[in-house]
Every structure is written in structure tokens, then in C-alpha cells.
Amino acid sequence: MSTRVEVLKTYKIYIGGQFPRTESGRYYSPKNKRGESLANVCLSSRKDFRDAVGAARNAFGGWSGRAAFNRAQILYRIAEMLEGRKAQFIDELVKQNASAKDAEREVNLSIDRIIYYAGWCDKFQQVFSSVNPVASSHFNFSVPEPTGVVSIIAPQNSSLIGLVSVIAPIIAGGNTCVVLASEDQPLCAVTFAEVINSSDVPGGVVNILTGKPSELIKYFAEHMDVNAIIYCEKDDANKKLIQEKSALNVKRAIFYDGVNWLDEEKSQSPYFITDTQEIKTTWHPIETVGSAKAGY
């Protein structure tokens, strides 16, 4: 009897609430340490990234304008859906070289991290806003506002927890994002896109691509409609490239190269939300008693 050939799953990309194949038609098959092919994974192109940025920009107005408590509800829904698919995520992590114990811990921590940021959605503005003392007859307020579209090169040594840890604070703060998943461990990223798609997240808020950072990092950094970029690796040459290309439109370059995403104390914080917030200051005149009488 002939040996049956396994039919590998094709993992597609996620853009604007849809699951297209890459326009380039290219794919690759990452392998685990045992030499087993994991799946057929799309090798995203520059055009895919541009489409994803367009989707993120179109979604930004609606997402940033939502009530903070509604964003919190949606993040909590993501955690609920991830909880319901724990077994699948654990299985994918095991395929990508994790032990069963470590895989379960990573999935549980990912769920808890999303809930953590769901809780901050309607609180961080109160914590980081201020009423500023000024030497004139004005009220002076400073409040954080989302910066816009954020491009993210996700941690390459993490399939799930790193991905979740960079996406959650971005969308909790009202931004939209385009994420390039781990090249060698992409399975959980695409499955997480399926979770997002069924979790009331509007199309375009989160866009997930798969492929090679070496091909796409330049475009992530130089695109003129991206407002900030997050890079999670220690490659100094790539950091320099990002800083140079980001200067073209003065986008914010953020580096998380020293973060252990499994560390519950140091890998979650409201400051990860404020990293992609702009501070808006408003001046409002105070009506004096004399001017009030004059008005009568």
C-alpha cells in the first residue's frame, strides 16, 4: 500500500476583514525542528502591504471614534473566542516546537493579556490626561489620542504571545495596524486572524500578513500613510534602516527588542498603549466676572 501524502493547510493572509491569497501567488512551507512541513503559507508582497495599509486607514476613523468601553467589549470578545479555540492554538504551538505544557501556558497568558488591555481601554486616558497650570485666563488640557496606522514587525521567535502583546495595546488605544507575523512560526498568527474575524472587530482594524521581514521591512518603514512602526528584533542594521526611512514622514519608530513577552510583570503595561498615542493640548478661555457683566 502506498503511503498517503498529507494535505497541508493553506494559511492565507488577512486584509480588510477578508482572507485573500497573496497577489504575488508565492508561498513557502516552514518546517519545524523535526523537519516536518507545517503548512503552505503566503509569501506576502509589497502590494499586499499597500492594500493592508489602505484597509487600516479606512478603518481608523470608525475605530478611533468608538466609545472606549465598546473597544473594551470587543477586546474581551477576542479573548472569549481565543478561549474557545485553546486546543487548536495549543496544537499549533506544539507543531512549532513548543512542549504541551509551554504551549498551554502561552495560550492562557495570551488570553489573559487581551483581557488586561480590554480593562485599560476606558481608563488610560484618565490616567495619562492632565489639567495643566498656565499663567493666563485659560483652562489647559492635555489628552492622549491615537496616532493612526501602525505597522508592526512581530517578534520572530514567538508564534502567539508576542503577536498578541503588540496588537492588543495598539487597538486598545484606538489605532489600526498592519502586522507581519513570525516567518518561521506563522501558524498561530493566521488562526488568530480567524479569531479576530469572528470577534466583532471591524474589517481593517487588524491586518495580518505572512512572509519575509527581509523583503518587507523597508516598505513597513517608508510608507507615507503609516504613522508609527514597531520592530521587535535586535538587528542593528534593520533598526538603522527603520530610523532612516521613518524620517521621510516623521513617523514614530518604536523598538521592543529587549522584551520577554512571557514575563507577566514586564511585558504588559498601559505604557505600551501610550507608545502609540499623541498628546493633544487644548486651550479654553475662562470667562472673567467683568466680561460676564459686560455681556449683559
Image (cartoon, grey):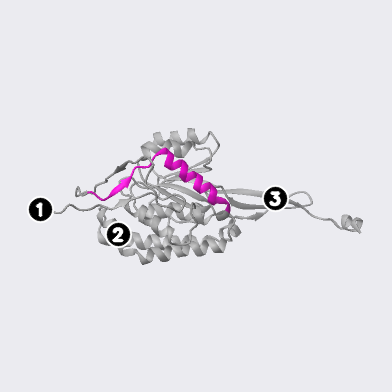
The magenta stretch spans residue 143:
no
Please report contact status of discs 3 and 1: CB closer than 8 Å, yes or no. no
| Residue in front for this viewpoint, 105 or 71 | 71
Please report contact status of discs 2 and 3: CB closer than 8 Å, yes or no. no
Q: How would you classify the magenta stretch by its main secondary structure?
A: helix
Give amino acid for label 3.
Thr
Q: Secondary structure at mark 3?
A: strand
Residue 173: give x, y in percent of width and height.
54, 54
Q: On the picture, is 230 further left or further right than 43?
A: right
Tell me the magenta residue range: 37-61
Give amino acid for label 1.
Ser
Q: Earlier in the sequence, mark 1 or mark 2?
A: 1
Location of the N terminus (image quadrant): bottom left
* Image quadrant assignment for residue 122: bottom right
| Label number found at residue 2 | 1
| Residue in front for this viewpoint, 21 or 222 | 21
Residue 92: give x, y in percent of width and height.
29, 57
Q: Secondary structure at mark 2?
A: helix
Count every numbered label the image shows and give the total: 3
Q: Earlier in the sequence, mark 2 or mark 3?
A: 2
Q: Earlier in the sequence, mark 3 or mark 1?
A: 1
Residue 210: give x, y in percent of width and height.
36, 46
Q: On the picture, is 184 further left or further right than 261?
A: left
Q: CA distance from mark 1 to mark 2?
A: 34 Å
Instruction: Give the residue number, with chain letter if any, for mark 3.
Output: 282
Q: Nearer the viewer, mark 3 or mark 1?
A: 1
Give amino acid for label 2.
Ala
Instruction: Give the residue number, with chain letter if any, for mark 2.
Output: 103
Circle 1 Cα neighbour tier, 10 Å, few/some/many (<14 / 14–19 / ≥20): few
Q: On the picture, is 261 further left or further right than 62?
A: left
